[in-house]
Amino acid sequence: MEPPQLGLIEQSFNSRYSNWAREALDELPDNFTITDPCISGHPIVFASRGFLKMSGYSRDQVVGRNGRMFQGPNTCRRSVMEIREAIREERGVEISLLNYRKDGTPFWMLFRMTPVFGKDEGRVIHFVAVQVPILRRRQRRRNGEGLCGEILSNSCRREVCSSSSVELAGVSAADSDCRVTALEIEEKCEASDTEKQLAATAIRNVLSVLTHYSESTGRLVCEKRVDPHLPDIPIVYASDAFLRMTGYARNEVLGQNCRFLTGVDTDPSALHQIKQSIQAQQACSVRILHYRKDKSSFWNLLHISPVRNATGKIAYFVGVQIEEGSVDRHGLSPEMRQLSVVGSIKVAVRISSP
Amino acid sequence: MIGKGKVGCQRGRQVADITAIHGVTRPLIHVRSVRRKLDIIQSNPSAHGGRGALPSEGGSPSDLLFLAGGERMMLRIKRVPTVVSNYQKDEGEDAARRGGGCGRNCLQKCCIPGAKLPLYTFKRAEEIPGDKCVLEHDDNQAPVAFLDSLLLGQWEDRMQRGLFRYDVTACETKVIPGRCGFMAQLNEGRHLKKRPTEFRVDKVLQPFDGNKFNFTKVGQEEVLFQFDASEDGEVQFFPDAPVDADSSPSVVAINVSPIEYGHVLLIPRILECLPQRIDRESFLLALYMAIEAGNPYFRLGYNSLGAFATINHLHFQAYYLAVPFPIEKAPTRKVTTLGDGVKISELFDYPVRGLVFEGGNTLQDLSNAVSDACIFLQDNNIPHNVLIADCGKRIFLLPQCYAEKQALGEVSSELLDTQVNPAVWEISGHMVLKRKKDYEEASEENAWRLLAEVSLSEERFEEVKALIFEACSYTLSEKEDEHLTQGAGDDKPPLEGTGSINKGRNCNMVSGTQECLVLQ
């Protein structure tokens, strides 16, 4: 197959990350590649110096080529299939893999790959793969564990004051402890904890560079998918005031992610701040432009806070919306009112019946 | 201190034996059974016994309630005190700090001038019947009371500012299966970071000691708002009111080691530095707070010294828990209705014996009935806990003796190992456990067993109850008398929660007029 034109490759990288990105990536000591699944052939668009050194190839020989070029006769086909599956499903994977250098010598490495999503598009932009050479061989059979999260759908036991606009979004266990699912594998060689650590660190390094350098192009990338169509923290409770304020009916709202409130002029950085806080399991307050069902917009003083249940773990995020300009008759500031709603919900959720 | 009610005194009783006159050495024995209180009371020179009578005055029936021991043999136990304020240091450090400017934005003379805190003023309920206990608010907009919102909002604010030592909502909690519904929480972080201190547990009344930690030393950021009666009879809120030392403000502050969400401390007339003892005015303030919050899941509690109060600066505690407490569900047996409409019942089928106060023609009547009982107990060195529940409609008074038992080595090591100090919340049925093992093995049975150790024995409780009635000059309602003579049924069922049983039991109580009271 003809390797794709260099122009496309360059474009893949440059349109997303600023010029300094390459330099910053080059400074990282880790071995990694960045690939673009949207270009035919899923080629490598960037390879780190460490990677080139490890594999023995030059940059020109690698960029534009697909990662299978490093596989050889003894590479486990099943592992390769798993990687392909992860790519297809647009998720991460961590697996030991036998690769071959330019001079034909095989080496075991821990292959860890993670997707990079376009913030606006909600789809995968790139895959980042790090390769950590495995120094020792170990014979072991490893069983995988699947993380099975259930979206909790309890509603508040205590009626929240109907004058407050509230929505409660359920968190699945998998979200709060995001780990790569390890599938059942038969492996001849397993990475040590140190090597896995290295892989994790490397991924973090690369992602942090990419995220940072994507900001200046205005086309943000992020680690987690924020596609509103996926079941990601759906609303499980909405107060009457929320429905009044937004113009939606309850059945239109339940089960949806609250992104449906955003629109054309909603500031992406406000959304970003919300996502970051949720991921960090912290409370945040933002002033965000939201849209009603009838497409009219309003400024929303939104406060989001994690809420824990009797297990002590986060079960929900509560969002309390106050339309800017509303006045409380007692002289409580909007912020204080929001906090008091958060408090009421925390009390209610705290000790749910067994 | 009241000892366990066991029968038997070794020799003939003399007045000198039962009065705790200073300087008289006597062996460390319990005052055993007050054989028949009648005898003792009749030997009492004064018409009614207890309130205000101090040991040195001698000659009052209350004296027999002292633990024979004298000054030389103080009862102490070691405890790890709970850190309730971020500024709580060991007592030694406090002394060193005295005299310098503190720079901590506290509530003492150094920082108070110019200080501003939110102020919530409630409307007094002079004319409103105690029964209703829901004050009329001008705004009937929200079903959620304003004080409730204010408290929760302020508390959440302090949460987000990181003022608490830990996130209490991250502590596992559960309702223990069983008919009582005891609650247990696993909280390993509550008791850390403080060294064990010796607490004197044989004196319910101890003078305020400015050298020790008290609430004027807390940082102002730990204070949520001032809480006082309004001047003009309206509920008002001032987000930014100056702290006027001359008006002797009362405040609500956070407890930085919370038992539950919203755990606060109500400190009446904080600048007056009152020791931990009940007075009528302060108790009424606490009752108003319960009413104003208007939330049945928001209760106030009080621990006397000797009943596991750790700070000798007058304070009540309060927090939210959205389930009924076991004590609130326990059946009660009516004891009497007073002339002012206050109904007094006693708990039964509950591990701890206690009295329940409700009703009253006015709020003050209810408040005073309870405060007077507390005042009697504290004057007679009987440790006790008080729970204000149901938005101030029901008040539980529980005398206890656990600390004394502990000091005398009478508590099993198994119970001691749980390091549960049975204060008002534990007695009400909410246990905070430090060890995972205790939490996982928590059962209705062992919760009951622990609390049963806390309770006065039946005999002792009967005596104390009788003395409370006598001392507080509770006058009976005439209506009650009529009922007794006519044998008519009460319009309110004497038993709550179960229904039918109506055991009669005679008990002679001597008051000034020698009235006879039938306890149903």
Image (cartoon, grey):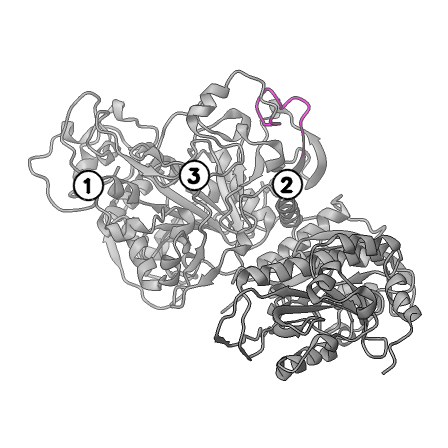
User: How far, Cα to Cα, is label 1 from label 2?
Assistant: 45 Å
Tag 2, which secondary structure? Answer: loop
Relative to A234, residue B119 above or below: above
Quadrant of residue A46 within the rendered picture: bottom right
**Residue B196, image x and y in percent?**
36, 37
- Residues under labels 2 and 3: Cα distance? 21 Å
Q: Which residue is tagged 3?
A: B371
Residue at the (53%, 77%) spot, across then down: A188
Asked if residue B514 shows in the view, the reply is no
User: Left or right: where does residue A14 sit relative to residue B442?
Assistant: right
What is the secondary structure assignment of the residue under circle 3?
Answer: helix
| Residue type pointed to by label 1 | Leu
- Magenta stretch: residue B109 in it? yes
Query: Residue tagged by mark 1?
Result: B38
x then y, percent, for residue A21: 83, 55
Q: Which residues are magenta?
A: B104-117
| Image: A63 above or below B1 | below
Per the rendering, the mark at residue B6 is none
Task: Name which residue lies at 17% across and 43% down.
Answer: B33
User: Residue reaching furthest left?
Assistant: B11
Farthest residue in the front direction? A103
Q: Chain of mark 1?
A: B
For mark 2, does the 10 Å Cα neighbourhood hold few (<14), some (14 to 19), or many (20 or more) residues?
some
Q: Are marks 1 and 3 on the same chain?
A: yes
Q: Amino acid at mark 3?
A: Ser
